[in-house]
Amino acid sequence: MRKKRNTVIFAALVILVALGSLLVQETLLKKEGSYAVVSSGGEEAARLPLSKNTELVIGDKKQGYNRIRVEDGFVFVEEADCADKICVHEGKISRTGEVIACLPHQLIITVESANRDDADTVAW
Ligand SMILES: [Zn+2]
């Protein structure tokens, strides 16, 4: 009897934890003001808010370029002249931690949540 009771409590705990983490994820994902951080050659080149539709070209036609677009909360590489075009085919990303990389151009786009920025702001 006691064992069964423990099992029920355990199951309830597992469900609670699962629901909790789901809630946290949902809140983080739906948090507005997430950024697409664009790094070129290992250095941060731009930080684009996903809430604002915009376009950014990194590089030029001589050295190679990536045309990055932010649209409806997503960021993606619209066009690039790299050989493999993997960055273009990676499609749209919007969730914290997702990455688009263009290895030939040493370009990396990552999505960061605004929470980290809040923490940074508090720190100074
Ligand atoms: Zn590429």
Image: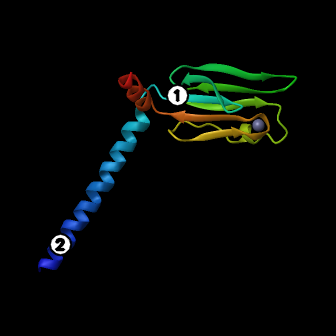
View quadrant of ligand 1: top right
Residue 89 vs residue 116: left or right? right
Q: Amino acid at mark 2?
A: Asn
Q: Which residue is tagged 1?
A: 35
Residue 19 vs residue 90: left or right? left
- Percent position of residue 99, x then y: 61, 40
Q: Residue furthest left?
A: 1
Q: Residue furthest right?
A: 62
Residue 115 vs residue 84: left or right? left
Image-quadrant location for residue 40: top right
- Percent position of residue 33, x then y: 45, 25
Q: Earlier in the sequence, mark 1 or mark 2?
A: 2
Q: Which numbered dot is residue 6?
A: 2
- Percent position of residue 86, x then y: 75, 42
Q: Residue at x 36, y 48 (%)?
A: 22
- Percent position of residue 8, x then y: 20, 69
Q: Is residue 99 above or below residue 67?
A: below
